[in-house]
Amino acid sequence: MSSNNEKKSGLDRPVSRRGLLGGLAASGGVAAGLFAGRANAAQPDPLITDIQDWNRYLGDGVDSRPYGSPSEFESHVVRRDVSWLTADATSSVNFTPLHALDGIITPNGLCFERHHGGIAEINPADHRLMIHGMVDKPLVFTMQDLMRFPRENRVYFLECAANSGMEWRGAQLNGCQYTHGMVHNVMYTGIPLKLLLEEAGIKEGARWLLPEGADASAMTRSVPLEKGLEDCLVAFKMNGEALRPEQGYPLRLVVPGWEGNMWVKWLRRIEVGDQPWHQREETSKYTDLLANGKARRFTWAMDVKSVITNPSPQAPIMHGRGQTIITGLAWSGAGKINRVDVSIDGGRNWQTARLNGPSLDKSLHRFYYDFDWDGSDLLIQSRAIDEAGFVQPTKKELRAARGENSIYHNNGIQTWHVKADGSAENVEVS
Ligand SMILES: Nc1nc2c(c(=O)[nH]1)N[C@H]1C(S)=C(S)[C@@H](COP(=O)(O)O)O[C@H]1N2
Ligand SMILES: [Mo]
């Protein structure tokens, strides 16, 4: 996929709210009357009065698409990367096009990808999962062995801890795909890890797990045994079909609510031990350097967060003033989302948004806020509150607590500046 977002120079500096609001009166009203309803048009609409080709000629038969893909008119809805972020083709990341989706489920072909050693292509017949270390009997499972274990279906978000990481020091990337697109939400079919661990028999004194991937990066992370027994899954299906190669085919670990990095893909080994291993991904990476030079470590749970997906820089308002819908996503590693508030004036006033769709534990939640847009400039924001009572902080509050050194765990409130012509831009209010 070609890169299509460049670093925006000059946006490192926060835009002051005073400055933006000062400009509101002057620019408001430019879009007036641009989008009068078609029903009033003087000319007859040929799309109504003429018979179109698709109405006249037979279409393709059922044999033409044995595995379906989206309409050609949706070809712009793809994962995209940021050129200056991606070092080379194999150590890379791309982003979910959140602005083009609705509901809560991420389609398989649009789930963002993050891999440290490229995509491992594994024939499931050649795949093995080993459980060893502090267990009564070390075991090796084939994929067929795993099919004998009771399985469960659960929907969870996966968010990379570095999601929004480029925004720690100021508004930078123009689009929620880039600022928030390192998240996806999928229904997994998998075996509770607890069942596999019990099959091997956990020895007394065991406290930690070390899952390892079969890819070239052989990714490892220390996971507390308690979490493994509580709700982790060894998954082989996503949204009903086999995992995609990008997502760890044929087997991945699901660690609900916790950093994406712990969700080891191409899962081939789980070691059981009595202390953490202090691997690369939990020491030099995925630790949060504070202003005082100390670092937070083992920051596993993803914090309460939300973002407005429409309108946003890649998805301007196209229909002009009047009845307008703001929509977005909210999630929390602590559980369900209780409430989402929306502001259209940069956080001075807040209204409660309407949550819609299933409200599931550690899953994305969809919210809508319907309002009458008068065509004036807006500073739109969303603020999520989860069932544990955590409230999404402003960026100012976040920086006061954590400084600006980190790239991980940025859950600050996002602002889009919507202009009179319906376009939107990434800004910060101060
Ligand atoms: N084996 C292996 N597992 C891995 C990775 C990897 O490079 N190799 N990347 C991790 C990171 S950093 C993240 S954020 C998630 C990304 O999952 P996704 O590609 O399904 O979005 O997988 C994690 N699991
Ligand atoms: Mo990640």
Image (spheres, rainbow, N blue to C red):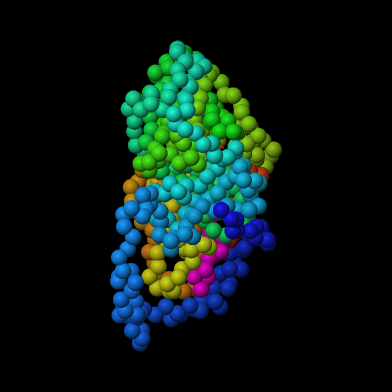
**Residue at coordinates 54% horizontally, 18% vertically from top-left?**
274
85 sits left or right of 382 in the view: right
Q: Position of residue 64 (x, y in %)?
A: 36, 55
The quarter of the image holding the C terminus is bottom right
251 sits left or right of 147 in the view: right
Relative to residue 352, is residue 94 depicted above or below? above
Q: Residue furthest right?
A: 293
For the image, the number of numbered tags is: 0
Viewer-nearest residue: 214 or 311? 214
- Tell me which segment is drawn in magenta: 414-426
Asked where in the image residue 362 lies, by quadrant, the reply is: top left
Q: Residue furthest bottom?
A: 42
Relative to residue 279, is residue 415 depicted above or below? below
Q: Position of residue 69 (x, y in %)?
A: 40, 53
**Residue at coordinates 45% horizontally, 20% vertically from top-left?**
140
Viewer-nearest residue: 109 or 315? 109
Viewer-nearest residue: 121 or 224? 121
Relative to residue 1, is residue 221 depicted above or below? above
**Residue at coordinates 65% horizontally, 39% vertically from top-left?**
289
Q: Position of residue 35 (x, y in %)?
A: 42, 78
Magenta stretch: includes residue 422: yes
In this orientation, does residue 237 appear?
Answer: yes
